[in-house]
Image (cartoon, rainbow, N blue to C red):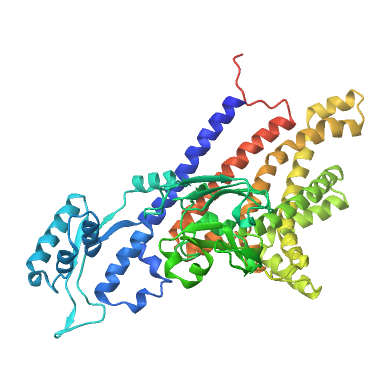
């Protein structure tokens, strides 16, 4: 079993990497990269050369290429001590055309060109766009270098940065004595309550580990999962955070800030991250914080996207199994009788009618019955879960009824059942010891998948009932050409698929000892 699991996990990892590579090829090689500007309102306001430079900067942001503006190159020289500020101010002022460059500008433009062309970059010089002697809108001269990112380096960078670990050397500025402090009494509780915490200085997060009164009670910011940064769906936020962050109205509580200021706030100080200069440059931060760990998340009153999807999915899965399997068994034992015919009609109806049609049908019926037809994050009305759960349960239940009936009938017609009858076993014994036990094994294999894929949500159901879940995240990202989200959600789905298959195999072997995944020489 151990050898099988190792090989299964290894093959799963290879499959996950292959899926991500295929998606990256589709996104970065086969899809027109200009599509990312379809919902970008900023580019419409730009003209000529400014628009062209903006396009390249966005392509870099979306992971298509590496982009280096000439001005950025000069600033790097200043930072490295290779250029003084006065010379930089002359060098950066390139002419409207190359022949109008000053001697200093010519020197550094040549250095810029030689350096980046030697590294495989393409250097682009856009002369100023004039109308007569006047500069047209956005026609300022531009100089930059770009290089398409190779697929191999993109894949390696993505997987090597999937998990990052905080450290005391994250902050580049002078922050005083760097290090970690362990305390049994978290200062956020006034130093009186027993609440162990590890606090960092020089780290990105102020609190690396801490304990509070919310599940799972022990929390950590030391390791961060990075599935991919969103640029349109939830701009600047990682996919993992987008799916896992709480939603809804703010939850206010009495907060005592590091300066001693106490007020009603939704800020979660345990999530504080470093932002250089934020404490001294902002009057509000100066009143609340004693250092630059000022960026905090807020506490909200409802579940995350994954949370909503999981609750709906897991309840509908439980209902589907608890209702669908017994009905499927009953249909097989009452083959071609009224129960079987009614069940078959339900199965055919559910399969034949498009899901969107019967979802709207139940939405209309539910509305007439007074049930909520859309989700409201500010409401605690549990009835708004009813219609989405029904819409998710019915197709799963029909599918389980169909396969349970088929497996049962297959087993009932097997030769070993006939031998068992001739041996004098009662129908009840044959059913419980043989037919049921064998027929349920293929069904058991799908249970882990049903549980895990509840986290991914259901696209159509969540859209119809406006469920703030994870179901429509991928489609929204595809519509908005949000590459980071597309790759991140694909990886998430791929991991869930591999894990569910492995857990399904393990569960089958646990339920039926006759199933063995080890190979023995005969």
Question: Picture quarter containing residue 509?
Answer: top right
- Residue occupying image coordinates x 47% and y 60%: 291
Image coords of residue 425 (percent x, y): 91, 27
Instruction: Using the image as rendered, state which of residue 227 and residue 500 is in the foreground.
Output: 227
Question: Is 158 placed left or right of 327 in the picture?
Answer: left
Image coords of residue 262 (percent x, y): 62, 67
Instruction: Using the image as rendered, state which of residue 196 and residue 519 is in the foreground.
Output: 196
Image coords of residue 222 (percent x, y): 52, 47
For the N terminus, the quadrant is top right
Can residue 105 be seen in this snapshot?
yes
- Residue occupying image coordinates x 74% and y 73%: 364
Question: Picture quarter containing residue 362?
Answer: bottom right
Image coords of residue 358 (percent x, y): 71, 65
Residue 185 versus residue 355 in the image, above or below: above
For the C terminus, the quadrant is top right
Total number of numbered discs in the rendering: 0
Question: Is 71 placed left or right of 272 in the picture?
Answer: left
Instruction: Using the image as rendered, state which of residue 310 and residue 364 is in the foreground.
Output: 310
Instruction: Using the image as rendered, state which of residue 75 and residue 387 is in the foreground.
Output: 75
- Residue occupying image coordinates x 72% and y 41%: 443
Can residue 354 be seen in this snapshot?
no
């Amino acid at each position: 079993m151990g050898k099988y699991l190792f090989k299964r996990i290894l093959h799963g990892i290879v499959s996950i990497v292959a899926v991500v590579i295929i998606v990256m090829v589709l996104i970065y090689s086969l899809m027109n990269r200009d599509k990312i500007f379809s919902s970008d309102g900023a580019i419409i306001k730009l003209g000529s050369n400014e628009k062209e430079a903006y396009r390249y900067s966005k392509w870099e942001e979306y992971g298509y290429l590496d982009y280096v503006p000439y001005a950025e190159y000069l600033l790097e020289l200043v930072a490295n001590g290779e250029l003084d500020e006065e010379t930089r101010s002359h060098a950066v002022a390139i002419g409207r055309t190359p022949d109008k460059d000053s001697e200093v500008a010519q020197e550094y433009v040549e250095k810029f060109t030689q350096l980046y062309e030697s590294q495989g970059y393409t250097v682009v010089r856009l002369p100023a766009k004039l109308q007569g002697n006047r500069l047209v809108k956005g026609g300022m001269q531009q100089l930059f270098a770009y290089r398409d990112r190779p697929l191999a380096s993109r894949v390696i960078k993505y997987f090597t940065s999937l998990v990052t670990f905080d450290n005391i050397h994250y902050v580049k500025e002078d922050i005083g004595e760097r290090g970690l402090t362990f305390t049994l009494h978290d200062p956020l509780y006034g130093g009186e309550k027993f609440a162990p915490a590890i606090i960092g200085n020089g780290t990105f997060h102020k609190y690396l580990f801490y304990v509070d009164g919310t599940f799972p009670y022990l929390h950590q910011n030391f390791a961060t999962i990075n599935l991919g940064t969103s640029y349109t769906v939830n701009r600047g936020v990682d996919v993992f955070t987008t799916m896992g962050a709480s939603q809804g109205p703010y939850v206010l509580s009495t907060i005592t800030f590091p300066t001693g200021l106490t007020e009603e706030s939704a800020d979660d100080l345990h999530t504080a991250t470093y932002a250089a200069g934020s404490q001294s440059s902002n009057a509000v931060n100066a009143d609340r914080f004693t250092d630059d760990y000022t960026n905090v998340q807020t506490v909200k009153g409802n579940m995350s996207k994954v949370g909503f999807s999981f609750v709906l999915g897991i309840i509908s899965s439980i209902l589907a199994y608890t209702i669908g399997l017994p009905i499927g068994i009953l249909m097989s034992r009452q083959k071609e009788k009224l129960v079987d015919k009614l069940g078959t009609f339900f199965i055919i109806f559910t399969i034949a009618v498009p899901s969107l049609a019967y979802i709207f049908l139940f939405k209309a019926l539910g509305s007439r019955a007074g049930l909520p037809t859309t989700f409201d994050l500010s409401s605690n009305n549990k009835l708004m879960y009813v219609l989405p759960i029904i819409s998710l349960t019915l197709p799963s239940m029909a599918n389980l009824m169909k396969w349970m009936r088929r497996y049962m009938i297959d087993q009932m017609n097997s030769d070993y059942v006939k031998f068992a009858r001739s041996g004098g076993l009662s129908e009840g014994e044959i059913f419980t010891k043989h037919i049921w036990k064998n027929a349920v094994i293929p069904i058991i294999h799908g249970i882990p998948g049903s549980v895990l894929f509840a986290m991914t949500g259901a696209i159509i159901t969540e859209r119809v009932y406006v469920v703030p879940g994870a179901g429509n995240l991928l489609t929204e990202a595809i519509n908005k050409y949000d590459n980071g989200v597309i790759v991140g959600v694909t990886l998430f789905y791929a991991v869930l698929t591999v894990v569910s298959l492995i857990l399904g195999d393990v569960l089958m072997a646990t339920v039926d000892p006759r199933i063995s995944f080890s190979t023995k020489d005969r």
